[in-house]
Image: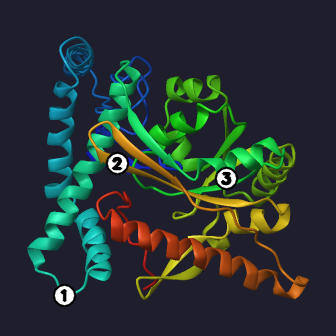
């Protein structure tokens, strides 16, 4: 059975995987060439050609580790370039974003933005690989004291993250302070994280909770998340792409247009009463990052009837924060699907 070539890009709370697939089921002997950080090739082809692919992957990883990360950067650059030229649906979605955010620009300007967006995603993954090789990652943090204050008070909180910069780098920086952290991700995103990477994250103290679309499972996920927060933990959850049933999403204004956002983070904030921190991790250059944590806020409603309005207001605050972030770092938001309400 042969399948169609597919290039996937997905972010679990900001974890993205570039994958080339020629057959849906995973091959049990296929190596992860980048030590759990990024899969450059994921190919299932029977026979000799499959062994050639496996050997190529192993050689690429060996060259990257023993000769230089530039080898992997070069290969990833080629993949991102192919993504730009051969996946028009993704390009179209990004063009819609940039045309909305930056009006009345030259058409070449928008194509340049998409090109930079694709390649920034690829190179941010290479930074994660370099980090796994023991290479230093330089970073600055802004607003870290706000989270430290909440942690010292034993309050916990909700950290709303975005597909901005590199979630992997942000998670590593965040873990340096030994916070109790849980990451909620969708079922589809969780499948794209291999066992080695998941084991590495959990081994470093980052608990992963997968939310499925089943109503009962979503309920239990919410209960477990609330328990974790009330025990003083910090819950990391994506605020820009839905991680549960599409029925739970709501709309907000983004660059003058309506977009869909998940209601989950804001609903959890309202029910738990925990402070909400919005976090962005910007890639300033090769191996150089800035983590910005906005001041905490509380989502509350004056009455039961006002709960829906409070949730929508919180989502709009996040959408406004995200809009400012995209204006400042337009190539950093790695979302390759249409986000606007049609």
Distance CA(mark 2)–CA(mark 3) = 22 Å
Q: Could you tell me if the residues under marks 1 and 3 are in contact, i.e. CB atoms within 8 Å? A: no
Q: Nearer the viewer, residue 126 or 136?
A: 136
Residue 29 locus on image (x, y percent): 40, 16
Does residue 247 sit above or below 282 in this rendering? below
Q: Could you tell me if the residues under marks 1 and 2 are in contact, i.e. CB atoms within 8 Å? A: no
Dot 2 or dot 3: first in sequence order is 3
Dot 1 or dot 3: first in sequence order is 1
Q: Could you tell me if the residues under marks 2 and 3 are in contact, i.e. CB atoms within 8 Å? A: no
Q: Residues within 10 Å of mark 3 (few under 14, many from 20)?
A: some
Q: Nearer the viewer, residue 3 or 77?
A: 77
Q: Secondary structure at mark 2?
A: strand
Which-is-in-front pick, marks 2 and 3?
3
Distance CA(mark 1)–CA(mark 2) = 27 Å
Instruction: Check residue 146 in the rendering and tell me which mark sits there, or answer none.
Output: 3
Residue 24 locus on image (x, y percent): 40, 39
Q: Mark 2 sits on what residue?
A: 283
Inspect this view and state whether residue 81 appears.
yes
Q: Nearer the viewer, residue 296 or 90?
A: 296
Inspect this view and state whether residue 186 appears.
no
Q: Secondary structure at mark 3?
A: helix
Which-is-in-front pick, marks 1 and 2?
2
Residue drawn at (23%, 65%) of the image? 91
Residue 288, by quadrant, is top left
Distance CA(mark 1)–CA(mark 3) = 39 Å
Q: Nearer the viewer, residue 26 or 121?
A: 121
Q: Is residue 111 left or right of residue 177?
A: left
Which-is-in-front pick, marks 1 and 3?
3
Q: Secondary structure at mark 1?
A: loop
Instruction: Check residue 104 in the rendering and tell me which mark sits there, or answer none.
Output: 1
Task: Identify the image quadrant of the N terminus.
Answer: top left
Does residue 70 sit above or below 151 in this rendering? above
């Amino acid at each position: 059975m042969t399948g169609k070539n597919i290039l996937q890009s997905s972010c679990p709370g900001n974890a993205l995987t570039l994958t080339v697939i020629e057959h849906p089921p995973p091959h049990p002997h296929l190596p992860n060439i980048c030590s759990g950080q990024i899969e450059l090739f994921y190919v299932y082809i029977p026979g000799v050609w499959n062994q050639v692919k496996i050997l190529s992957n192993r050689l690429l990883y060996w060259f990257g580790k023993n000769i230089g990360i530039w080898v992997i950067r070069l290969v990833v650059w080629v993949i991102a370039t192919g993504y730009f030229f051969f996946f028009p649906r993704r390009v179209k979605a990004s063009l819609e974003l940039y045309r909305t955010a930056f009006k009345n620009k030259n058409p070449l300007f928008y194509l340049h933005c998409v090109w930079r967006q694709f390649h920034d995603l690829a190179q941010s993954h290479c930074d994660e690989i370099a980090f796994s090789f023991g290479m230093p990652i330089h970073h600055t943090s802004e607003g870290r004291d706000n989270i430290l204050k909440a942690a010292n008070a034993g309050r916990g909180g909700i950290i709303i993250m975005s597909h901005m910069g590199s979630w992997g780098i942000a998670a590593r920086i965040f873990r340096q302070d030994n916070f109790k952290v849980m990451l909620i991700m969708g079922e589809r995103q969780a499948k794209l994280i291999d066992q080695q990477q998941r084991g590495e994250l959990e081994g470093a103290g980052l608990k992963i909770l997968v939310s499925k679309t089943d109503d009962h499972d979503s309920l239990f996920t919410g209960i477990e998340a609330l328990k974790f927060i009330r025990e003083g933990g910090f819950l990391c959850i994506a605020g820009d792409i839905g991680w549960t049933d599409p029925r739970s999403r709501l709309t907000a204004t983004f660059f003058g247009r309506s977009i869909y956002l998940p209601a989950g983070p804001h609903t959890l904030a309202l029910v738990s009463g925990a402070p909400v921190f919005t976090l962005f991790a910007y890639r300033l250059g090769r191996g150089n990052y800035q983590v910005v944590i906005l001041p905490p806020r509380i989502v509350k409603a004056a009455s039961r009837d006002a709960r829906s309005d409070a949730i929508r207001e919180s989502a709009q605050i996040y959408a406004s924060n995200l809009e400012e972030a995209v204006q400042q770092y337009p190539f950093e938001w790695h979302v390759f699907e249409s986000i606007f309400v049609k």
